[in-house]
C-alpha cells in the first residue's frame, strides 16, 4: 500500500507539478523502482491505480521553484496580476503556499494592497519581481494564519 501511495502521488505531481517538481517526481519513481523488492515492481511498472491524465495547463507567469524558496525564506514578491476581467494590478505579496490543481496552480499570499489573504492564479501573473525584503512572519505561522482565514471564510459561507 505504501509503495502504491508513493507512486500514485509522484505520478500526480509528475503530470501537474511545475517543471522542477515534475522532474523530481519522475526521479522519485525511478528511485522507488530501484529499491523495492522484485516482487513489488509490478506495482510500479503496471499499477492497478493511477491518476487522470493531466490537462494542458497554461504556462505560469512566475517561477514556481523560486517562489517555493521565497516562501521558505519569508521574502516578499512584487507581482503584476491580470484578473479575470483583464485588468492588471501591481501588488506586493507575502507568499504562503502554492496550490496545485488539475487545471491550474494558485499562489496563496498575504496581499499588502488588500491587507488580507488573496489567491492568485499563476497563469494570470504577468510579471514578478523577487524582493530581498523579508516580511517578518515565519513561513509556518503565515500558513497557519492562511488556514485560519480559509476556515473562517468557509464557516461564513456555510452560515450564509
Image (tube, helix red, strand yellow):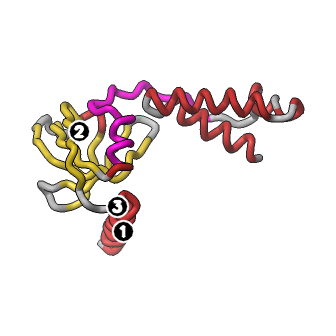
Span shown in magenta: 51-71
Element class at badge 3: loop
In the displayed structure, does residue 78 sit left or right of residue 50?
left
Q: Residue at x 65, y 38 (%)?
A: 8
- The picture places residue 37, in percent across and down from the top left corner, at 86, 34
- The picture places residue 95, in percent across and down from the top left corner, at 30, 50
Q: Outermost residue toward the bottom?
A: 159
Q: Residue at x 14, y 57 (%)?
A: 114
In the displayed structure, does residue 26 sit left or right of residue 150?
right
Kindly indicate the quadrant of the structure image that contains residue 36: top right
Location of mark 1 (residue): 148
Report how far apart the C-alphas of labels 2 and 1 lie in the structure: 26 Å
Give the numbered dot on residue 130: 2
Q: Nearer the viewer, mark 2 or mark 1?
A: 2
Toward the viewer: 99 or 24? Answer: 24
Q: Is residue 69 magenta?
A: yes
Give the numbered dot on residue 138: 3
Give the numbered dot on residue 159: none
Say whether disc 3 or disc 2 marks the residue closer to the N-terminus. Answer: 2
Report whether residue 110 is seen.
yes
Report how far apart the C-alphas of labels 3 and 2 lie in the structure: 18 Å
Amino acid at each position: 500500500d505504501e509503495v502504491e501511495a508513493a507512486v500514485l502521488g509522484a505520478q500526480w505531481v509528475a503530470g501537474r507539478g511545475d517543471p522542477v517538481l515534475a522532474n523530481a517526481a519522475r526521479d522519485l519513481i525511478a528511485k522507488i523502482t530501484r529499491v523495492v523488492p522484485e516482487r513489488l515492481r509490478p506495482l510500479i511498472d503496471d499499477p492497478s491505480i493511477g491518476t487522470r491524465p493531466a490537462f494542458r495547463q497554461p504556462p505560469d507567469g512566475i517561477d514556481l521553484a523560486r517562489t517555493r524558496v521565497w516562501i521558505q525564506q519569508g521574502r516578499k514578491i512584487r507581482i503584476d496580476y491580470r484578473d479575470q476581467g483583464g485588468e492588471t494590478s501591481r501588488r506586493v505579496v507575502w507568499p504562503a503556499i502554492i496550490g496545485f490543481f488539475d487545471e491550474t496552480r494558485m499562489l496563496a499570499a498575504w496581499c499588502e494592497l488588500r491587507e488580507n489573504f488573496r489567491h492568485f492564479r499563476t497563469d494570470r501573473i504577468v510579471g514578478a519581481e523577487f524582493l530581498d525584503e523579508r516580511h517578518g512572519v515565519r513561513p509556518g505561522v503565515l500558513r497557519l494564519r492562511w488556514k485560519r482565514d480559509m476556515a473562517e471564510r468557509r464557516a461564513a459561507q456555510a452560515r450564509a
